Image (cartoon, coloured by chain):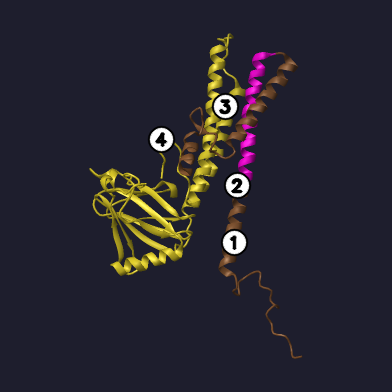
Amino acid sequence: MAHPSQLGFQDAASPLMEELLHFHDHALMIVLLISVFVLYIIVTMITAKLTDKLILDSQEIEIIWTVLPAIVLIMIALPSLRILYLMDEINDPHLTIKAMGHQWYWSYEYTDYDDLGFDSYMIPTQDLAPGQFRLLEADHRMVIPMESPIRVLISAEDVLHSWAVPSLGVKVDAVPGRLNQTTFIVNRPGVFYGQCSEICGANHSFMPIVIEAVPLAHFENWTSLMMEDA
Amino acid sequence: MAGEEQENNNNKGFRLLGILDVQNTPCARDAILHGAGGSLAAGLLHFLATSRVKRSFDVGFAGFMLTTLGSWFYCRINNAKLRVQQRIIQSGIKNKIVYEGTVLDPTNKPGAETPSGPS
């Protein structure tokens, strides 16, 4: 989860998010250098004593300030397009989960297993145990096996919602009557938090997403327990 | 305790011009330091050669841009190659554990388990 007053991205938990962080660093370095350059030009122009009212054109500098920005844009676009196409690669998921948005909770259905489904409501602040996170904890977590490609089919039962988990680099709109798909792989075990990302009513801020990535053996134990309880 | 220390470290990340977190971005600190060094060297050498102050500042700035960019790309490319190698090694370790003791184990020597001939 994010720590207080965090400005940057959360640590990546999926290969795609790692690539996005890598690209973000690259883009920000270019942004920094352009900003420093503009600042230097401003200072130079303010402190210059020379003026020339008779300059009409200058082919050389116009070529430079056309070609250089084009090169910079290509340097940004090529990695960006690479990641864009990387996101759409087909990777044969091992597990499919349906995430349905409701007002104001998420429900998860593991249709690969018989009758495994549950609702995930936010734990109210007054019911939190010590160490739990306000507005982020849910009573039932979406448990998935780590290092396995997971397909999540996202839709909504009433109004627009959005299923987002920043540390996995996932944000997909939940549209009533439409099925959106995303796939991801979680690199490491842990608990990853997200929040509804499309305004959906009074409790839009109070329907978090909690993903718990566990080793496969633990996941199998969990599914057995859940099906017994059901 | 360790978590609090880590949070303190994260909070103290210094953002150059409020844009780039130099401490927590791989290669950023080295690139900026190399850029500063390159800028100083280029500007100073130009001034010593020409005694022109303003132009030396311009040359120093150009040196900063080029050195920073060059150091950044060199470091990031090496970083990317290391990450690829790390992933290959990780998947190799994982596969070794999965296939160990089976027919698919690459370390299995084909003649090791054949029974000895009649004495």
Q: Amino acid at mark 3?
A: Trp
* Sequence-wise first label, 3 or 4: 4
- Spatial CA distance of label 1 from label 3 is 50 Å
The answer to whether residue A112 shows anywhere in this view is: no
Query: What residue is disc 3 on?
Result: A65
Instruction: Using the image as rendered, state which of residue A64 and residue B98 is in the foreground.
Output: B98
- Spatial CA distance of label 2 from label 1 is 20 Å
Within 10 angstroms of label 3, few (less than 14), some, or many (20 or more) residues?
Answer: few
Marks 4 and 1 share the same chain: no
Q: Nearer the viewer, mark 3 or mark 4?
A: 4
The span shown in magenta is: B52-80
Q: Position of residue A73 (x, y in %)?
A: 53, 36
Within 10 angstroms of label 4, few (less than 14), some, or many (20 or more) residues?
Answer: few
Query: What residue is disc 1 on?
Result: B93
Q: Amino acid at mark 1?
A: Ile
Mostly what secondary structure, the magenta segment? helix
The answer to whether residue B99 shows anywhere in this view is: yes
Marks 2 and 1 share the same chain: yes
Chain identifier, colour brown: B
- Spatial CA distance of label 4 from label 1 is 38 Å
Q: Residue at the location (57% across, 40% down)?
A: B26
Q: Amino acid at mark 4?
A: Ser
Q: Residue at the location (26% across, 45% down)?
A: A126
Q: Amino acid at mark 2?
A: Ala
- Looking at the image, residue A137 sits to the left or right of residue B11; the answer is left
Query: What residue is disc 4 on?
Result: A5
Query: What residue is disc 2 on?
Result: B80
- Residue A203 against residue A66 in the figure, above or below: below
Q: Nearer the viewer, mark 3 or mark 2?
A: 2
Q: Secondary structure at mark 1?
A: helix
